[in-house]
Image (cartoon, grey):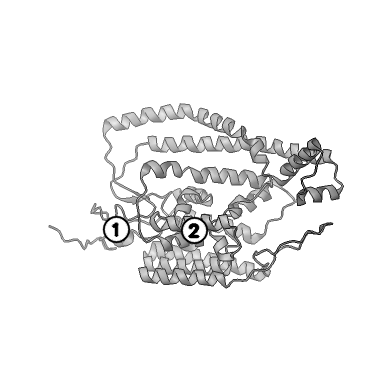
Amino acid sequence: MQKIKYILFSILFFITFQVVNAQRFPEPEFETDYTVPETQTVSPRALAWEYMDVVVLFAALSIMSWFVLKKRSRKGIFWTSIFSIAYFGAFREGCVCSVGSIQNITLSLFQADYVIPLTVIAFFVLPLLFTLLFGRTFCAGVCFMGALQDLVHIKPVTVPTWISKPLSALPYIYLVLALLLAATGADFIVCRYDPFIGFFRMNATFGMFIFGAIILILGIFVGRPYCRFLCPYGVLLSWMSRLSIWHTTVTPSACIQCKLCETSCPVDAIDKPTIVKPESADKGRKRLITLLILLPVFVFVGGFMSSLMYKQLSAIHPTVSLAEEIKWEIDNHKKTGSEESKAFHTSGIPAEQLFADAASIQSQFYVGTWIAGTLLGLFFGISLLQHAVVQRRTDYEPNKSNCVSCGKCYKYCPVDKDGKSSLIQL
């Protein structure tokens, strides 16, 4: 199986070098001698092909859910993952992407003139719906980014809790930042800083190629580093998975406490049995009450600290950055010579109007950073509350929130579907 992984991984990367991309948007017209450089972006597709992508997504989710829950087949999960990398990655070049669709959905909610395609809505909703029903089977391998990381994971290393716990907060920060920038029309940072699409399109900057390479090299040892410590869509999937009606289990029948699966999960999502002592339960109740009292404090502090950065964040918006550039030109009585500055001066728009638009956008960022900060404070408080609640477990169980349904724990369980164990009883 390891040799097959190496061969398939090499073939998939060879395929990406053969992909030729066409320019997506028409060239802007400048009244200067500026020449627009060639870009490597995905070509527009016929509407029928876009609907075909939705059909393929639905089929892949259905097949993957069947392999995870019904067949409990790691081989089936593996080969479905290979298909996802080939189709959604190499062939479709990562577009449409469910991870990036959260930005399109947000922009459509806050800007009435933005028309969102139905296919993008489908790519956003379908994985969430399947997760609510069957757990994170989308993460198991239908998501080509997760599948690619799973493919290179060949030398597992356990990440210490004191490292993984703080890093697990990064997806929440990334999520609220992506929502804020999308809602204000500033940027789609999830797409801009996607570490893997550049490999398939061969048009990423040198820095993004390095970033993607680092993620893949890290993924050799750490199970799915992007999924666990960066993916903003994973936050939504974890919420849905927590409420899932059906979910994969470590064992197909009764757990016999053999402990063979204890370290089998690549993302450390297996919860061990717990023994709750009366005194620890009492301490847990006291911590719970204290945290409930402190929860409003976390919310306010998060909002206040975040609001202090609204000016810096608003500078990401092209209108605000242009206004700052024009103001610098006026104050220093010289031109910067940038293409943005030249385009503005030839547009005939008064500087006062530009400054007013920029001020309005900064006001939106001020409100948005308060909301984003309060959400982060709320997430932090809820996370502490979850750790304060004493949970009783008698078996080894997958953590429904963090389990990505990869099925790698299946082979470690010696119990078959009839409840029989293959272990020799001594």
Q: Are marks 2 and 1 in contact (CB under 8 Å)?
A: no
The extreme left residue here reads 426
What percent of the width, then of the height, locates residue 181? 64, 45
Question: Quarter of the image containing the C terminus?
Answer: bottom left
Q: Name the amino acid, label 1.
A: Ser
Q: Residue at 84% of width from left, 47% of height from top?
A: 345
In the picture shown, does residue 386 fall above or below 257?
Answer: above
The extreme right residue here reads 348
Residue 167's disc is none
Estimate how packed mark 1 is, as few (under 14), some (14 to 19) or many (20 or more) residues with alpha carbons within 10 Å.
some
**Can residue 1 be seen in this snapshot?**
no
Q: Residue at 61% of width from left, 50% of height from top?
A: 189
Q: Secondary structure at mark 2?
A: helix
Q: Name the amino acid, label 2.
A: Ala
Looking at the image, is mark 2 or mark 1 nearer the viewer?
2
What percent of the width, then of the height, locates residue 49? 63, 70
- Judge by depth and name the residue closer to the eye, 30 or 3: 30
Q: Residue at 16% of width from left, 61% of height from top?
A: 424
Question: As drawn, is 260 to the left or to the right of 247?
Answer: left
Q: Secondary structure at mark 1?
A: loop
Instruction: Look at mark 2 in the image and give the residue it sits on.
Output: 213
- Judge by depth and name the residue closer to the eye, 285 or 291: 291
Instruction: Look at mark 1 in the image and give the residue it sits on.
Output: 253
Q: CA distance from mark 2 to mark 1?
A: 40 Å
Mark 2 or 1, nearer chain start: 2
What percent of the width, then of the height, locates residue 34? 78, 58
Question: As drawn, is 177 to the left or to the right of 61?
Answer: right
What percent of the width, then of the height, locates residue 282? 32, 29
